[in-house]
Each structure stands twice: as structure tokens, then as C-alpha cells.
Image (cartoon, rainbow, N blue to C red):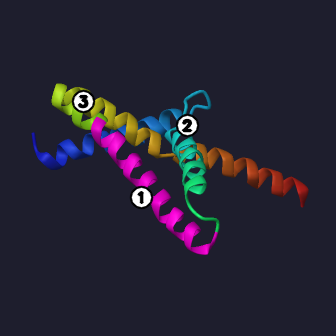
């Protein structure tokens, strides 16, 4: 199978799933997990560094490094294991991840609600 075609399968599937379902409210979104990671890491970093401008800057750099590293390593590890086990399992999981990062249908729905609320106020 052509490599470019293989790369496009999860993206196209993710777009299709997003247009079909949007972001279900019952599904725990990865952004919430990242938010918990930020909150947890920030508490630890703030307790270890001095409470001055330099300490906050160093803490900010550490926080960015932690969040970006974990946010990249976890999906990479999941996909690495899935593709290593079976190609189509990797495609399915990567398609789901692509679906999770898109929000076209939900953004349109929510922006329509804002538009209607503003229109009705005026």
C-alpha cells in the first residue's frame, strides 16, 4: 500500500467521524487530561521553586517541557504499540485520535448557539 495513502486513512476517517458524531459530551476528552497534568505539575513545580520572577520563569519552562513531552509521548507510545501489534489496529486507534482532535461539527453547533443568542438580544 502506498505510504501517503496509509497516512491519509486515519485523517480522512477522523474527519468523517467528526462530521458524523461531533464531540460527544460523555466522552472524556484528552484536553481534560492535559489540563489535569498541568494542574498537578504546576503544584509540584511551585512548591519546589522560589516565588519570584526567576522562579516563575524557570517553572514555566519546566511546565511547558513536561506538558509537551507527555502530550507527545503518550500518543506516540500508544500508536507505536498498536501498529507494532497489528497494522489495522494502529489505523483504527490513529483514526480515533484524529477524530478526537477535530471539532468542526461541535464548533459549528456551539457557534450557531452563540449567534442565535446574540441575534435574539439585539
For the residues labelled 3 and 1, the Cα–Cα distance comes to 26 Å
Front residue (pair 61, 53) = 53
Q: Which mark is residue 18?
A: none
For the record, the magenta segment spans 52-77
Under tag 3, what secondary structure?
Answer: helix
Q: Residues within 10 Å of mark 2 (few under 14, many from 20)?
A: many
Residue that extends furthest to the bottom in the rendered view of this protein: 53
Is there a contact, CB below 8 Å, between mark 2 and mark 3? no
88 over 50 or under it: above or below: above
Residue that extends furthest to the right in the rendered view of this protein: 121
Q: Is residue 70 visible?
A: yes
Q: Residue at x 36, y 48 (%)?
A: 72
Of the 4 image quadrants, the one containing the C terminus is bottom right
Is there a contact, CB below 8 Å, between mark 3 and mark 1? no
Point out residue 70 in the picture as x, y percentages from the top left corner.
39, 46
Point out residue 90 in the picture as x, y percentages from the top left corner.
25, 32
Q: Residue at x 45, y 52 (%)?
A: 67
> Which is more foreground, mark 2 or mark 1?
1
Point out residue 73 in the picture as x, y percentages from the top left corner.
33, 45
Magenta stretch, overall SS: helix
Q: For mark 2, what is the residue?
A: 23
Q: Which mark is residue 82?
A: 3
Lower sequence index among marks 2 and 1? 2
The reply, left or right, for residue 8 in relation to residue 87 is right
Amino acid at each position: 500500500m502506498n505510504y501517503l495513502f496509509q497516512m491519509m486513512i486515519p485523517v480522512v476517517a477522523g474527519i468523517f467521524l467528526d462530521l458524523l458524531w461531533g464531540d460527544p459530551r460523555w466522552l472524556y476528552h484528552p484536553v481534560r487530561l492535559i489540563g489535569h497534568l498541568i494542574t498537578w505539575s504546576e503544584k509540584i513545580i511551585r512548591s519546589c521553586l522560589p516565588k519570584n520572577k526567576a522562579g516563575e520563569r524557570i517553572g514555566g519552562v519546566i511546565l511547558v517541557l513536561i506538558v509537551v513531552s507527555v502530550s507527545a509521548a503518550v500518543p506516540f507510545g500508544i500508536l507505536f504499540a498498536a501498529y507494532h501489534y497489528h497494522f489495522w489496529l494502529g489505523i483504527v486507534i490513529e483514526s480515533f485520535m484524529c477524530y478526537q482532535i477535530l471539532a468542526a461539527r461541535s464548533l459549528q453547533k456551539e457557534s450557531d448557539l452563540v449567534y442565535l443568542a446574540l441575534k435574539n438580544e439585539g
